[in-house]
Image (cartoon, rainbow, N blue to C red):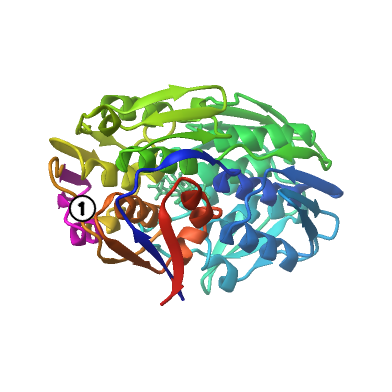
Amino acid sequence: MEKLVIEGGRKLTGEVKISGAKNAALPLIAATLLAEGVHVLNNVPDLRDTRTILRLLESLGLTWKREGDALYIDGTGLRYSEASYDLVKTMRASVLVLGPLLARLGKAKVSMPGGCAIGARPINFHLTGFEQLGVTCDLEHGYVDARIEGRLQGGTVYFDIPSVTGTENLLMAASLAEGTTVIKNAAREPEIGNLIDMLTAMGARIEGRDTAQLVIRGVKTLHAATSRIIPDRIEAGTYAIAIAATGGEAVVKGCDPAHLPALLGKMHSAGVAVDAGTDSLSIQSPVCRGERIAAVDVTTMPYPGYPTDLQAQFMALMTLATGVSVIHETIFENRFMHVAELQRMGADIKIDGRIAMVKGLAETDLFGAQVMATDLRASSSLVIAGLAAVGRTDISRIYHLERGYEDMVGKLTGLGANVWKEDE
Ligand code: EPU
């Protein structure tokens, strides 16, 4: 196994280019199951998770090739309907094949994802939604066995909480259903807009993009199309926070600042100067102006609220602020695994249930330490802390990072960081 080593204390400067979004690439790749022919996806990040879903598609009979950041996926060969435990246990987003398999084959057997490092993460909303479309779902030996005789039937689906992959799964299934489906309290993340654009290019009829009510008028068949993955807003936010935390000044290129409304507001309140262009963000830490980072409270919410996927990174920034920041995690019940590791680096944080109180160090620094990555975003918060800390930080289990950050070592090195991988 490899670990990441950071010699901290260098200000990040220059520019960094953002990759395509992991959480858009996964549903768009799954959507190629919906139609025969060669689908072209551009701006696809090469990550552990995108490789996993491609392996899953292969196991279902599809073929694909990659040329640079373009993927050519042929949906013609689909003939199997089972997603094995071996694949699903490494990536929960594998459940995204359920909707397309039901739509095209009328059956799907997908291993139930277990709990994970950030919470229980059930898939009951997905299954209840499919049942509204006429599907019978049984749970047997750790697998969801779902099937329907004939075509899916349009219906009304209501989510208690707007679920991102739940909305995506239902959108894909309903596109090929007979009749009209309405999804109420749908998630509105930009990745869902990206999927709607792809489905529309494939011949689907969907109304309500970017709203909480989606209306899908089912069609008999869809066709292959060319789509582009949107920039990764979480990767962009992670680098923006890292630049601010190191006291640096740099440009985050190839991103969409319109997808980061909550983070940019919080950065501004923290005293970070943010200049948002159409596809770039110029970030200047207050430290560049001889000022300190200010403490700001954050509550995670579904989009357009503050994203849970940027909670851990913002906490790392707040450990350096002047004052106390209250961070409330409302989406996942166990998403503070990074706290104990940040404490090993000198951070002053107290947790009470889903609330963390972060007392900024103000005049002192974090110090380097040996820490352990527990999930993808927790890992990136440790990277930010390590970059800002004095001395050497060793982060073990970096396979978590490789699930969602393309070439992080190369990108950080380009920003002037002293960071490298080593065998543990
Ligand atoms: N929920 C249920 N039942 C369900 C589905 C969701 O109770 O059937 C609950 C969840 O437990 C959670 C809330 O609803 O409390 C929202 O979860 P959601 O379904 O939206 O999460 P997800 O679709 O499983 C996606 C991202 C996550 C991101 C969340 C929240 C992908 C592939 N994953 O997960 O990304 O944190 O939305 O924005 O899109 C990451 O990239 O590190 C990551 C974890």
Magenta run includes residue 346: yes
The answer to whether residue 184 is above or below residue 382 is: above
* Drawn side of residue 180 relative to residue 17, left or right: right
In front: 12, or 141?
12
The residue stretch that appears in magenta:
340-358
Magenta region includes residue 186:
no
Q: Label 1, on which residue? A: 366
- Relative height, residue 27 to residue 214 (above, below): below
Q: Residue at x 48, y 54 (%)?
A: 123
Q: Residues within 10 Å of mark 1 (few under 14, many from 20)?
A: many
Residue 318 falls in image quadrant? top left
Q: Position of residue 307 (x, y in %)?
A: 39, 38
Q: Position of residue 113 (x, y in %)?
A: 49, 63
Measured as percent of width and height from the top left, residue 244 is found at 33, 37
Q: Mark 1 CB in 8 Å range of ligand 1?
A: no
Tell me if residue 114 comes above or below residue 328 in the rendering: below
Q: Quadrant of the C terminus?
A: bottom left
Q: Position of residue 407 (x, y in %)?
A: 55, 55
| SS assignment at label 1 | loop
| Residue 49 found in image quarter | bottom right
Q: Which residue is rendered at x = 48% and y = 66% of the image?
A: 399
In this rendering, position of residue 86 left or right of residue 360: right
- The residue under the point 66% across, 33% down is 196
Residue 281 versus residue 130: which sits nearer the camera? 281
Q: Nearer the viewer, residue 295 or 205?
A: 295
Whether residue 39 is visible to the viewer of this picture, yes or no, is: yes
